[in-house]
Amino acid sequence: MHIPFIWSGARYESKHRRDLTSLQGLSLGEIDELPSILISRIAHELKATPKQALADVHKAFKKAADLFGSATLDGESPQDYVRHVHLISGVPLKAIESSVKELSHALATAEQYITGSAPNLAPIYTENASRENKTAYWVPKGQILSVIAPGNNPAVHKAWIEALAAGYKILLRPSAKDPFTPYRLIRCLLAAGISPFMIALVPGDHSIVQAIVDAGDLALVFGDRNTVEQYKGNPKVITRGPGYSKVYWHFEASNHDLIAHAQARDVIVRSVVDGGGMKCTNASGIVVNKAHLHELDEIALQLNGYGSNGLLDYTSDLPVFRSDKAYAIRDYVHQIFHSTDILWKNVKDEEWIIDYGDGTAALSPLLVHINHLPDHIRYMELPFACSWVYTPEPDEVRQTLKSTLALSLLTEDQDLIHWAITEPTIKKLVINNAPTWTTHDMVPHDGFITEHLFISKGVI
């Protein structure tokens, strides 16, 4: 399979290509690599071409929703696509199949999501707007959104899909870890009727990243904590970094039965493990009241029940890595916790890595109970199911819960729930005894992407 540079709806073949290989070193195809010198030219031509009517964009999205999960595109069936992403990234097959459904649904409901995210008094301005006076419109800040795409889970591509549905043109660099998802999305969007002048797929190595960021009116950049720090304070860059998502558990013993406690343990386990523990909404921190510490052993039993037979294991919930990377992650985790008193953990060191002997390995879920929470652990996020457990003093609880993408509150403390809703460093709150990664059609993931892309403009 060959993933080319796509612009104006056409495939352009570059002289420079890179092999796409599975975690076992087997060939999956090739991908073009463009030099940074071409990026400004592509962006200039994007701006110079007509913008597609929003009604036509939304019509194409509904058709693309069916194509993404069912069509064979460029000889790649939906089953081939899932297999390709799994073999190159190690994301569990079940997680990828779930993401296919999530992305198809996002395409089908994009119009409602974008329309619903606009202020009630300022609808999105379109070419058919009545242009009445004494009104307001939501108008875009620019024309082009540059995207530095990630590869930790296919569902993260919903963010730029929403921007396209809002009328932005997209200039996208795919991740080396998963170039198959954006390529398939773009192919099905074009096949469904998205104008070829609305989107460009620009593959390349890390040297083109800054050129792509600079070329857009705004940029959506995914990355680690260093990436977030790099673009901090840059008004044109929207960063999507680590989530540091958490679960907080404090039940009043007299108010909850054994079933409620079992449900709480299940929420914690699923928050940590589901999807391979690779998403920014997976819990990387568990904050519990001391009254619940005796239940850690039961949680450990559940976590230790997760296993994997390696690549192409449809029953597995664990991600797979190259063996050298798995051992490097293990060493890094040892380094992180080296200077911290570990009170308890769910797995022995010698049982932690599952080495398949074929150049790949998995890491068993890891839960570590610590007696204090330094910043280097508080802001730890790893590409597998790994979480710290901390029992703060009552006056520490709120500070511990800050800086959280998704927070699941297992508590009846209404004052704490009210505080969490109003705390700006907590981006999403789950209060219905559900895992951190729980989603809903009209609930934003990290705020509405349109908050960054539009401004309200009065017309008198």
Image (cartoon, helix red, strand yellow):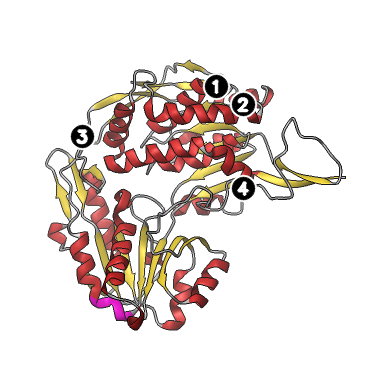
Residue 123, given in percent of the width and then of the height, sits at: 71, 43
Is there CB contact under 8 Å for labels 1 and 4?
Answer: no
Taken as a whole, is the magenta stretch helix, strand or loop?
Answer: helix
Residue 74 lies, in percent from the top left, at 38, 18
The residue tagged with tag 3: helix, strand or loop? loop
Image quadrant where residue 131 sits:
top right
User: Label 4 belongs to which residue?
Assistant: 117
Q: Secondary structure at mark 4?
A: helix
Q: Is residue 242 above or below residue 410?
A: above
35 to 156, vertically: above or below = above
1 and 2 marks in contact (CB < 8 Å): yes
Numbered badge on residue 193: 1
Q: Please state which of residues 314 and 340 is positioned toward the viewer in this rendering.
A: 314
Badge 1 or badge 4: first in the primary sequence? 4
Q: Which residues are magenta?
A: 290-294
CA neighbours of label 2 inside 10 A, class few (<14), some (14 to 19), many (20+):
few
Viewer can see residue 306 = yes
- Give the labeled residue for mark 2: 56
Q: CA distance from mark 1 to mark 2?
A: 8 Å
Dot placed on the residue nearer the N-terminal end, 3 or 4: 3
Give me the residue at 33% from left, 62% from top: 267
Amino acid beneath label 3: Gln
Badge 1 element: loop
Which of the two discs, 1 and 2, labels the residue nearer the N terminus?
2
Sooner in the amino-acid sequence: mark 3 or mark 2? 3
Q: Which residue is mark 3?
A: 24
Q: Marks 4 and 2, how far apart in space? A: 19 Å
Label 3 with label 4: CB-CB less than 8 Å = no
Q: Amino acid at mark 4?
A: Ser
Left or right, 251 with reference to 12: left
